[in-house]
Image (cartoon, grey):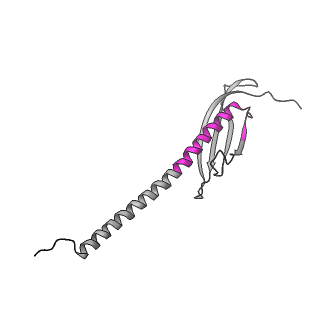
Amino acid sequence: MKERGFTLLEVMVATVIMGIAVAGLIAGLSQSVKNASRLTDYDRAAMLARTEMNDLLLADLPFEGTLEGRFDAARSGGIPSGWRASVAPFEAPPNAGPGTMIVERVALAVWWQPASGTRREIQLETWRGARIPTPSGP
């Protein structure tokens, strides 16, 4: 009479194969969670950069110089982050004097430092019209 069923060796081989498959699946899921977290941080930084750039364009900026600041923890999701902006003349007509409209370049760098410890940065730049300031007297 012939018995049906699996031998101990077949069961052990199947268990090893399933263990390898499950370990690979868990490793893949772990990497997916890390990537999702990294992308969430990047998306938050991009949103903060766009908002800060809009604020800078509406603000009364110096004709030339650098500004910097930090973001409130509530806005940055509790991740240490900040920004640095530089404003400089980009293009001016020949022999431009005080009061002449020129093109100014506004460059913004937003940085953040996630729990992983590696400081990351995103950069934006735009141009805007500005007048060359009139020199103030002594």
Q: Which percent across, then down, holds residue 49? A: 61, 40
The answer to if 49 sits in the magenta stretch is yes
* Of residues 43 and 129, the one drawn nearer to the viewer in this rendering: 43
Q: Quadrant of residue 62?
A: top right
Question: Height in image: 111 above or below 1?
Answer: above
Picture quarter with the N terminus? bottom left
Q: Residue at x 71, y 25 (%)?
A: 96
Near-viewer residue (2 or 51): 2
Residue 83 on image: x %, y %: 66, 45
Residue 127 in the image, given as x and y percentages of width and height: 62, 31
Residue in the picture at 68% in, 40% down: 86
| Residue numbers of the magenta segment | 38-66
User: Does the stretch in magenta take in 69?
Assistant: no
Q: Main secondary structure of the magenta part?
A: helix
The answer to which quarter of the image holds residue 102 is top right
Q: Which residue lies furthest to the top in this view?
A: 100
Viewport quadrant of the C terminus: top right
Rendered position, 123 above or below 9: above
Q: Nearer the viewer, residue 27 or 121?
A: 27
**Residue at 12% from the left image edge and 74% from the top image edge:** 2
> Residue reaching furthest left?
1
Relative image position of residue 108 (x, y in whole percent): 64, 41
Looking at the image, which is closer to me, 126 or 112? 112
